[in-house]
Image: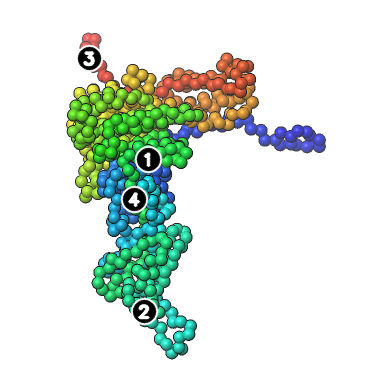
Amino acid sequence: MALDYFAPGVYVEEVDRGSRPIEGVSLSVAGFIGFTEDVRGDAELFKPIMITNWSQYLEYFGKEGSDGFTDFNAYLPFTVQGWFLNGGGRCWVTSIGTKLPGTPAPSEEETATKLLSFGGKPSLSFNLKLPEAAEGDTPALPPSTGRVSVVIQDSAPKPLPEDAPEDAEPPLNNGEYFKLIVVQEPTKLEEYDHLTMNPEVDSAVGDYVGTELEASEYVTIANIAQSGQPLSLRPANGNYEVAPPPYIAPVERLNRDITGNRDDREGMQGLLEIDEVAMFAFPDLMKAYETGLINLEQVHGVMEMMLSLCENSFPGPPYRMAVLDTPPVKPSKGTQAVKPEQQKPQDVAQWLSAFNRRSMFGALYYPWIKVANPRNNGLPIFVPPCGHMMGIWCRTDQNRGVFKAPANDTPRGVLGLAYETNMREQELLNPIGINCIRNFANYNRGYLVWGARTLVDPTNIQWRYISVRRLMSYIEKSIEIGTQWVVFEPNDSDLWGRVSRVVSNFLERLWREGALFGASPAEAFFVKCDASINTPDTIMMGRLYVEIGVAPVRPAEFVIFRISQWAPNQ
């Protein structure tokens, strides 16, 4: 606005009087933590990285040319694959290692990068040269940035020296010579030319690769070639990655690696520093339990932490949910892990009673699911269902909306169930918040998710359903982010009206989409922002109060038809 007008004329001034519509946030981004086959590229151990498809997961967490799964059947790859199969989109993945804690360290021969000749025979092997750790030191983390690549290219014999006679003939280039470059993208670290596999080569013509690379600061080399001519033993051209040995933590460090810390953005706490992560799971908590790395009490401790992290989201409203898995345990036979198919519904009910932790920000699914295992020629394996279920959450959000219960839907990629729960058995589990995955073959409907409850106290029916909890989180988070422009605006009736209109328009849009219950907007919600709640005292303290009430739709969990005989009047 101009301060003064001195000369006659037309003045055009731009005045911002419009409202800023609230845009809904996404609650469809997942977080995963667990063991992976490798940690490559931009990914770092214990730190979350965004993944948008399965190919990208392989790029970061699978070895070159691998299927991305592990030899010890870590559950994380199955979970992430299930997430994408069932409609999941963007997610964040944190690797806590590529080997189980306490696993014997592999030998240099096992971790070496092996190069083959053009004929496919063994030629050379490389290992990363690492500084020797002092005795008793904790093993250093092998950062993915520490990897190097060995590039093999064509070369030729050394040229004749400058003082060579004019009629001297240059050495014969029979194709056995090659150039070796050590690269750490995008930097070229070392370069060796005129190399050969012949240990008795004339130094005026070429250099034996084994002798030359003894001086390398980055790699160690071993000649693994069999007998033959230098040309037949020469490594094939290409780019070969040389990785550091895997980080293998001591068993007693596992809990610390899982927890991580916020400051370094590591572990579970670091994963939840990513604001967009709205649901997360830790499938390999079950792998650690099955392999005896932790006991059932420690499992409960990690689950407790998962729920507590979801319940604390200061300064904004809590909006995350943890999807838990049932530990394969039979309480009647102690706390040792058993096969998932040996766990019956009554065992799960007893376990949950012993865990004794309730939260509206948690969900639990039973039983484990059977999926194909690429590492075992496609034969089935039982895995926790959390990733597949979270994918269904995301799919439901996209197809229907966050207000629709993620149930009565088919989980993709599922070949079978560890236990086929019947109606009577679900009557035991459903009231205590355990959602069943059931086989409805008798109705020709296949496998269906047949539950949509949170782990809230069963008496707190207001927060019984996953869809209600997530809808309220969606509304709260959207309003929080969409009204940031209000801060430091003049706190008067004009602002009160603008805020009321913005919030009401947002809620009316939700009502029209079917997220709120009521025949009219007035029945579905109310927004109050006036002088009755914004008194002179609160205005003096710089506070603006807005009261909002909504009537969320709830799933028709029990459909009851009352049928009787009817005799029409005659």
Residue on which the image places disc 2: 202
Q: Kindly report which numbered mark, 3 or 2, lies closer to the viewer in this rendering.
A: 2
Mark 4, residues whose alpha carbon is within 10 Å: few (<14), some, or many (≥20)?
A: some
Q: Disc 2 marks which amino acid?
A: Asp
Residue at image point 26% right, 67% down: 121
Q: Kindly report which numbered mark, 1 or 3, lies closer to the viewer in this rendering.
A: 1
In the image shown, does 456 or 73 lie closer to the viewer? 73
Residue 257: assigned label: 1
Residue 246: assigned label: 4
Q: Is residue 189 above or below residue 267?
A: below
Which residue is most to the bottom? 167
Find numbered disc 1 in the image and state the secondary structure of the residue it sits on: helix
Residue 333 at least partly seen: yes
Q: Disc 3 marks which amino acid?
A: Ser
Q: Are marks 1 and 3 in contact (CB under 8 Å)?
A: no
The span from disc 3 to disc 2 (Cα, nearest Å) is 103 Å
The span from disc 3 to disc 4 (Cα, nearest Å) is 69 Å
Q: Is residue 332 above or below residue 399?
A: above
Find numbered disc 2 in the image and state the secondary structure of the residue it sits on: loop
Left or right of residue 218: residue 536: right
Q: Quadrant of residue 175?
A: bottom left
